[in-house]
Image (tube, helix red, strand yellow):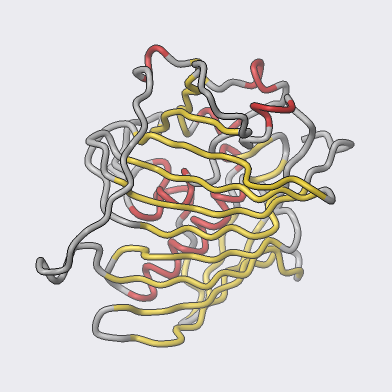
């Protein structure tokens, strides 16, 4: 049975290089589609175009918000098909206007040379998911249709850090497996880490998001740690890490976002 994530990020191929379909509103933050969902829609078409391999990296620039329950068009171009890595560029447009531009690389995640030493980032020690606060519309003060699709738990405990940072867990609400495209979504599915320091300051729309997938996750919850590196001139820079349930680093992210205190969400 096809998962909700796969089904609702898959568009219909129109021709050799383009796909069309309607964006689903179950992935909204307020009345706007989540940026990670929009990215996953483009990446799904890219993966089908490339034909094999996992997502290795993606860089996305958001030009304007998407619109749910409205037709979207994805246009792709394969820039290079190599023996190990294939690189693709793609865009998402709605109503004739460009919303998202993506550059991504696909390949194999397994270590190809056992002689190369590894340097690994250790996972933090967190309370279990059932001991953490569930993200909800009530707790965040905004309608979150996306909570029907992803289960986010926020860990609340004392740390010595003065940074604006957030720890927690995430999985699909239907418990479907997490693949490399899901990690791109998960990298943008937690509340902004700046909320942990300043409270809900308003809408935080993404300008640019980079995701690097480091390994394939095992089954179970995914652990997240996000922190704000810098906040000035109405923009913030956030770094994120995701680990699987066995403590292996599976993805890292970097995001530039605006801070809009006057927005509805």
Residue shown at the point (54%, 31%) measured from the top left: 166
Residue shown at the point (54%, 57%) measured from the top left: 39
Up-down: is 111 above or below 22? below
Residue sticking out furthest to the top: 131
Front one among 119 and 187: 119
Quadrant, the N terminus: top left
Residue 175 position within the rendered picture, expressed as x and y whole percent measured from the top left: 32, 31
Residue 140 position within the rendered picture, expressed as x and y whole percent measured from the top left: 67, 22
Up-down: is 49 above or below 94? below
Residue shown at the point (68%, 52%) measured from the top left: 206
Front one among 17 and 179: 179
Residue 187 position within the rendered picture, expressed as x and y whole percent measured from the top left: 49, 46
Quadrant, the C terminus: top right
| 138 sits left or right of 187 in the view | right
Q: Quadrant of residue 151?
A: top left
Up-down: is 190 above or below 40? above
Q: Quadrant of residue 135?
A: top right
Residue 98 position within the rendered picture, expressed as x and y whole percent measured from the top left: 72, 69
| 122 sits left or right of 44 in the view | left
Residue shown at the point (46%, 86%) measured from the top left: 79
| 253 sits left or right of 94 in the view | left
């Amino acid at each position: 049975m096809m998962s909700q994530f796969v089904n609702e990020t898959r568009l219909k191929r129109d021709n050799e290089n383009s796909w069309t379909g309607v964006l689903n509103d179950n992935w909204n933050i307020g009345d706007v589609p989540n940026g990670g969902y929009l990215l996953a829609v483009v990446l799904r078409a890219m993966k089908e175009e490339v034909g094999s391999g996992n997502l290795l990296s993606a860089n996305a620039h958001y030009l304007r918000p998407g619109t749910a329950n409205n037709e979207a068009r994805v246009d792709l171009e394969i820039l290079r098909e190599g023996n190990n890595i294939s690189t693709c560029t793609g865009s998402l447009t709605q109503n004739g206007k460009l919303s998202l531009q993506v550059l991504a690389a696909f390949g194999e995640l397994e270590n190809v040379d056992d002689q190369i030493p590894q340097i690994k980032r250790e996972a933090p020690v967190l309370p279990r998911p059932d001991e953490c606060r569930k993200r909800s519309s009530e707790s965040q003060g905004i309608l979150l249709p996306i909570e029907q699709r992803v289960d986010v738990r926020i860990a609340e405990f004392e740390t010595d850090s003065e940074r604006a940072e957030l720890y927690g867990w995430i999985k699909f609400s239907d418990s479907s497996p997490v693949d490399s495209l899901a990690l791109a979504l998960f990298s943008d599915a937690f509340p902004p880490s700046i909320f942990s320091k300043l409270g809900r300051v308003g809408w935080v729309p993404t300008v640019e998001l980079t995701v690097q997938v480091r390994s394939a996750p095992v089954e179970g919850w995914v652990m997240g740690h996000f922190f704000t590196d810098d906040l000035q001139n109405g923009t913030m820079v956030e770094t994120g890490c995701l680990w699987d349930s066995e403590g292996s680093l599976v993805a890292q992210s970097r995001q530039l976002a605006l801070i809009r205190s006057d927005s509805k969400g």
